[in-house]
Image (cartoon, rainbow, N blue to C red):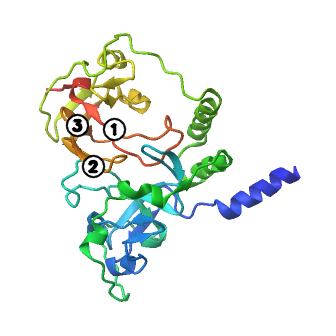
């Protein structure tokens, strides 16, 4: 009992989240944020990028506290005092028109927590007395996703207490967090999570494709899981794009097309690549429950062959 008590006391001190899901925050003024950055435009390794400027002085609700995150090509990593905000996403215009549409990551130092009676008004500005800080445009033109390794630290098995923090912050419900922990335990003991193989066996690169030329605002229905599995190879991929486990819960439901995904930065390689017959759907995001509790809330990439138009 003494050990448990000490553990809980330690958790309370070190891992009690400051910002929680639903909290209203106000982004500090540009000058205030610039004053927190080093010469490379970073705070604790995390870039403040050009596309974030337009959100300065505005209010948003916290979507999730991000204490762990998957860095592509590396795996799960830890983050400190970082959140994502509702509707504060990258439009890609500052990064060669990348269409990946990521949620910006915000250090808590860049935000002001509003009181419960402060309201939610995205047009409210901060009156800042901070001195103007100069940084070259090149310092702010770095995509956050391309330097996440520097902004994170190694994730160890002893960091499982972070899943309790997810409950406190509202990122996951107790049931969701328990399910994530079960999947993590399974992965640790088995080395991988067992998934049923697609019924149709086709060689990589020969999977079928369809071009629907879907446009933003169009209504589509995601096909059934069996229909989608029939378009995949033995690695659960259609022409190199994986149908992830998180996407299964969206099957059979209807969504609006958010935007076409025709080019994007490949995080691991750090280069821009073209992509065809693929869209992002409004509200279709990865909640991380099938990826060890990653809290990036990325939009799922959806091949046009996985959906049908709704007239």
Horizontal side, residue 212 vs residue 148: left or right:
left
Specify whether residue 22 is in view: no
Q: Which residue is mark 3?
A: 279
Q: Quadrant for the C terminus, please.
A: top left
Horizontal side, residue 279 vs residue 225: left or right:
left
Q: Residue 44 at x, y = what percent? A: 48, 68
Q: Residue 279 at x, y = what percent? A: 22, 37
> Element type at marker 1?
loop
Q: Earlier in the sequence, mark 1 or mark 2?
A: 2
Q: Which residue is mark 1?
A: 300
> Element type at marker 3?
strand
Horizontal side, residue 167 vs residue 294: left or right:
right
Q: Earlier in the sequence, mark 3 or mark 2?
A: 2
C-alpha distance separating marks 3 and 2: 20 Å
Specify whether residue 21 is in view: yes
Q: Residue at x 31, y 55 (%)?
A: 89
C-alpha distance separating marks 1 and 3: 9 Å
| 245 or 45, nearer to the observer | 45
Label 3: how many Cα within 10 Å (few below 14, some 14–19, many 20+): many
Q: Which residue is mark 2?
A: 271
Residue 219 got which mark?
A: none
Horizontal side, residue 228 vs residue 95: left or right:
right
Looking at the rendered structure, the number of numbered marks drawn on it comes to: 3
Q: Residue at x 27, y 38 (%)?
A: 281
Q: Residue 138 at x, y = what percent? A: 26, 70
> Element type at marker 2?
strand
Q: Are marks 3 and 2 in contact (CB under 8 Å)?
A: no
**Measured along the vertical axis of the image, is residue 13 above or below residue 208?**
below
| 185 or 6, nearer to the observer | 185
Q: Are marks 1 and 2 in contact (CB under 8 Å)?
A: no
Label 1: how many Cα within 10 Å (few below 14, some 14–19, many 20+): many
């Amino acid at each position: 009992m003494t050990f448990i008590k000490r553990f809980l006391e330690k958790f309370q001190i070190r891992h009690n989240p400051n910002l929680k899901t639903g909290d209203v925050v106000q982004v500090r003024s540009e000058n205030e944020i610039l004053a927190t950055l080093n010469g490379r435009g970073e705070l604790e390794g995390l870039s403040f990028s050009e596309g974030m400027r337009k959100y300065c002085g505005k209010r948003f609700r916290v979507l999730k506290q991000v204490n762990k995150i998957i860095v592509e090509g590396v795996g799960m990593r830890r983050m400190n005092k970082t959140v994502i905000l509702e509707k504060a996403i990258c439009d890609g215009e500052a990064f060669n028109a990348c269409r990946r549409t990521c949620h910006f990551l915000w250090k808590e130092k860049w935000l002001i927590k509003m009181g419960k009676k402060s309201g939610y008004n995205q047009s409210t500005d901060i009156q800042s007395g901070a001195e103007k800080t100069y940084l070259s445009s090149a310092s702010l033109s770095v995509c956050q996703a391309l330097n996440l390794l520097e902004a994170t630290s190694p994730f160890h098995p002893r960091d499982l207490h972070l899943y309790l923090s997810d409950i406190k912050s509202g990122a996951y419900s107790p049931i969701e967090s328990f399910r994530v922990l079960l999947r993590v335990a399974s992965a640790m003991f088995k080395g991988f999570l067992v998934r049923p193989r697609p019924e149709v066996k086709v060689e990589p690169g020969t999977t079928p494709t369809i071009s629907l030329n879907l446009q933003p605002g169009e209504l589509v229905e995601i096909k059934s899981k069996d229909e989608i599995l029939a378009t995949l190879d033995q690695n659960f991929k259609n022409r190199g794009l994986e149908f992830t486990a998180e996407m299964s819960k969206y099957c059979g439901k209807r969504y609006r097309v958010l935007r076409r995904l025709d080019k994007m930065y490949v995080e691991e390689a750090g280069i821009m690549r073209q992509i065809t017959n693929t869209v992002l759907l409004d509200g279709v995001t990865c909640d991380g429950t099938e990826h060890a509790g990653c809290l990036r809330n990325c939009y799922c990439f959806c091949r046009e062959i996985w959906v049908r138009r709704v007239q």
